[in-house]
Each structure stands twice: as structure tokens, then as C-alpha cells.
Image: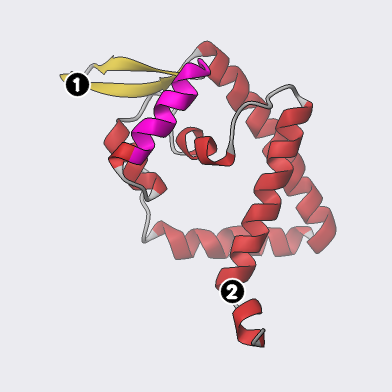
Amino acid sequence: MISWRRQNIGRRMNESVRRFDGRIMHLLRERGYNYLSLAQLSVTRNLDDDGTRLTELARRAGMTKQSMGELVKQVEDLQLIERRRDPLDARARLICFTPSGFDWLEAFHQSLMIAEAEMSAEIGPEAVSFINHALGKYSDDWFDPH
């Protein structure tokens, strides 16, 4: 394989995300949350605490409304989220966490903190802080979650 194809920042970020997300999923399974896939995780990662419209979830995840709708249905079937009337527009629906969903979100948060601490132990807290800051600068101009 040509070295630039393996040793470029895009590939390294992708491999790092797969490793990091894999660790989070492992930790969630250890806590008894073994029913959510990485694809379904894109719903909860992009969902605001007070709810988000389906079209906005799809935009944030970079997928079609139809694909996000299917993932929302799957996570809804797991009773982690539900659809509620949007108080600002009675015709619209918000996707919202259920009480069980907020419990799952706390388990996700704890798993995320463990994965970050492990990364910090492996590559150093300064490197983790730098990566977080640099990637934030790179993505914030392109993606605004609100």
C-alpha cells in the first residue's frame, strides 16, 4: 500500500474514531446497554436535551431525512426516545429522550469519560487537550449544532 494512503490525517482520524467509539460501546455493554448500534448512536449524539426535529438530526449527522427517520424508529422501539409535539409549531414533532433515554445518556457520559481518561493515559493529557481544541476549531466553523 502506498504510505500516504495509510498515513494521512483523514485515515488516522477515522481509525481513531472507530477505536474510541468501539471502547465506548464496550463500556456501555458492560453496563448492560448492549442493544444500541454505532449507527443508532448518531441519533443520541445529535439529540439536544430538550429535543430536536428529525430534519435537524439528519443534518447534524450528515445523512438523509429518510435514513435518520429509520434510525429514530429503531431507537424509539428501544424506548430511549419518543416523539413529542413541538411547542413552537403544533404541526412539527420533536425527538426527545425518555426517562430511560436520559439514564442511557448518563451511562454514555460515564463511558465517554472513561474512554477519554484512557486516551489521556496513553497519549498524554496535553495531546488530548490539543486534539480536542484543534478539532473543535476545525469543525466549529463547518458544523453549528444549534
Displayed quadrant of residue 26: top right
Position of 49 with respect to 69 (left or right) is right
Q: Amino acid at mark 1?
A: Leu
Task: From the top left corner, tell me how far across and down residue 22 is, in percent.
Answer: 70, 46
Can residue 110 be seen by looking at this rendering? yes
**Residue 9, label in figure:** 2
| Residue 69 inside the magenta-drawn segment | yes
Task: From the top left corner, tell me how far across and down residue 134 is, in percent.
Answer: 55, 65
Q: Which residue is mark 1?
A: 88
Count of numbered circles on the image: 2
Could you classify mark 1 by the number of other residues whose Cα lies within 10 Å: few (under 14), some (14-19), or many (20 or more)? few
**Residue at disc 1, secondary structure:** loop
Q: Nearer the viewer, mark 1 or mark 2?
A: 2
**Residue at disc 2, secondary structure:** helix
Question: What residue range appears in magenta?
Answer: 67-79
Q: Amino acid at mark 2?
A: Ile
Residue 120 higher or lower than 39, as above or below: below
Task: From the top left corner, tell me how far across and down residue 52 is, in percent.
Answer: 34, 30
Position of 59 with respect to 36 (left or right) is left
The quarter of the picture where the N terminus appears is bottom right
Position of 125 with respect to 132 (left or right) is right
Name the residue rendered at 64%, 69% in the picture: 12
Position of 16 with respect to 89 (left or right) is right
Name the residue rendered at 73%, 62% in the picture: 126
Residue 128 higher or lower than 144, as above or below: below
Task: From the top left corner, tell me how far across and down residue 136 is, in percent.
Answer: 51, 58
